Image (tube, grey):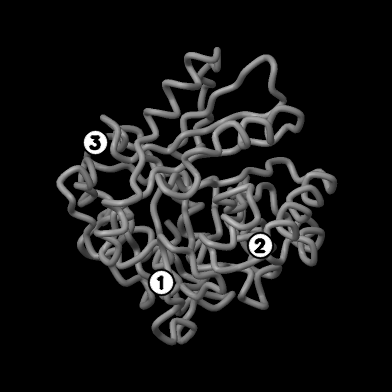
């Protein structure tokens, strides 16, 4: 098992397969990608070896992230590769949704169990302003298609932005009222290149949490491989509302996930100062050395990030290792 010095067990791997993204979200890549980040991305064979090593150490869930993972033409094969690894029970994908209508069926056939789609506004003009793309209707159609296919979990991720979507809570609640979908609000996090933007736009998730509790929403119990979201349900709503609040007390106490970048770099935390390069361990199918390295590496995982002290580590932007 992968167990750190604080007795936390890591059963969840977040695997970035590219830093490249075709959206220009104001909180992440407002100027688009600034480097040729396609060079050196993990191959299918390397991904198989990596996921195999993690699975043999108790990892049960893999989330494929980016950048925008669907920009890789071999995404369907990557999904199938991860799902075929013995011990992996769940393969999930985080996407901006621009290829959902075209590829969701193929992804499902490859073994995809869950999709998280980033939608930061339900107003088309506001969505365009935030993302730089006028594609809200197409993405919502893709979400509906994924649900119709019967993909077990379809969720929406919404980054809270004080000046852009703070007034849309009623619209988001109406969206989940009549359909069984989970919508999660994510607090904006400070990264290396967004300090001034963060100061203008950060909105505490506790404000949403208090409104939900006042309206009769109830906290649900987490599954072992769930991420950090606190998910709430209401008897009058088919869907759920989740909150990811990295600035809240004890946010890191039950951390169960590790991150690997598209270049094969192990990040013990989204906001760590450093990473460990795993590439040298991915040249052969013998994963024993990689397993030993991972078991030793997790002993150096800090108890908590330092976001409260305005320290975001080496993370330049959220596309770097998948948020």
Q: At 38% across and 76% down in the image, what residue appears? A: 279
Mark 3 → mark 2, Cα distance in angstroms = 32 Å
Position of the N terminus, as image quadrant, is top left
* Residue topped by disc 2: 79
Mark 2 → mark 1, Cα distance in angstroms = 17 Å
Q: At 49% across and 40% down in the image, what residue appears? A: 185
Q: Farthest residue toward the right?
A: 148
Along the line of sight, the residue nearer the viewer: 284 or 167:
167
Chain-order first, disc 1 or disc 3 = 3
Q: At 34% across and 63% down in the image, what residue appears? A: 266
Chain-order first, disc 2 or disc 1 = 2
Label 2 neighbour load within 10 Å: few <14, some 14-19, many 20+? many
Residue 114 seen in render: yes
Q: Where, by quadrant of the figure, is residue 95 drawn?
A: bottom right
Chain-order first, disc 3 or disc 2 = 3
Q: Is mark 2 on a helix, strand or loop?
A: helix
Label 1 neighbour load within 10 Å: few <14, some 14-19, many 20+? many
Q: Where, by quadrant of the figure, is residue 29 drawn?
A: bottom left
* Residue topped by disc 1: 264
Q: Is mark 1 on a helix, strand or loop?
A: loop
Determine whether, in the image, residue 314 is placed left or right of residue 162. left
| Image coords of residue 314 (percent x, y) | 24, 65
Along the line of sight, the residue nearer the viewer: 153 or 172:
172
| Image coords of residue 250 (percent x, y) | 27, 31
Determine whether, in the image, residue 155 is placed left or right of residue 179. left
* Residue topped by disc 3: 6
Residue 260 seen in render: no
Position of the C terminus, as image quadrant, is bottom left
Q: Farthest residue toward the left?
A: 309
């Amino acid at each position: 098992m992968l167990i750190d010095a604080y007795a936390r067990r890591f059963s969840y791997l977040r695997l970035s397969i590219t830093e490249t993204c075709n959206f220009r979200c104001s909180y992440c890549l407002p100027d688009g990608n600034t480097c040729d980040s396609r060079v050196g991305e993990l191959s299918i064979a390397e991904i198989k070896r990596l996921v195999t090593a993690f699975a043999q150490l108790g990892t049960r869930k893999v989330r494929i992230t980016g950048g925008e993972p669907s920009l890789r033409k071999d995404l369907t094969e990557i999904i199938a590769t991860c799902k075929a690894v013995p011990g992996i029970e769940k393969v999930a994908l985080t996407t901006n949704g621009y290829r959902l209508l075209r590829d969701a069926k193929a992804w499902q056939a490859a073994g995809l169990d869950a999709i998280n789609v980033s939608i930061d506004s339900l107003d088309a003009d506001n969505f365009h302003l935030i993302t730089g793309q006028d594609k809200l209707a197409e993405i919502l159609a893709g979400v509906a298609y994924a649900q119709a296919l019967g993909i077990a979990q379809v969720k929406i991720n919404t980054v809270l932005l004080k000046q852009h979507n703070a007034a849309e809570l009623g619209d988001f609640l109406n969206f989940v009222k009549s359909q069984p979908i989970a919508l999660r609000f994510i607090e904006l996090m400070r990264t290396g290149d967004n300090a001034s933007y963060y100061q203008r736009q950060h909105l505490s998730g506790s404000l949403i949490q208090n409104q939900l509790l006042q309206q009769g929403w109830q906290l649900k119990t987490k599954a072992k491989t769930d991420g950090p979201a606190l998910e709430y349900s209401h008897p009058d709503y088919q869907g759920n509302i989740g909150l990811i609040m990295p600035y809240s007390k004890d946010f890191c106490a039950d951390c169960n996930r590790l991150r690997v970048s598209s270049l094969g770099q192990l990040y013990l935390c989204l906001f760590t100062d450093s990473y460990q390069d795993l590439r040298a361990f991915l040249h052969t199918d013998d994963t024993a050395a990689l397993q030993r390295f991972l078991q030793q590496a997790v002993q150096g995982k800090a108890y908590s990030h330092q976001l409260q002290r305005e320290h975001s580590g080496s993370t330049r932007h959220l596309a770097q290792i998948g948020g």
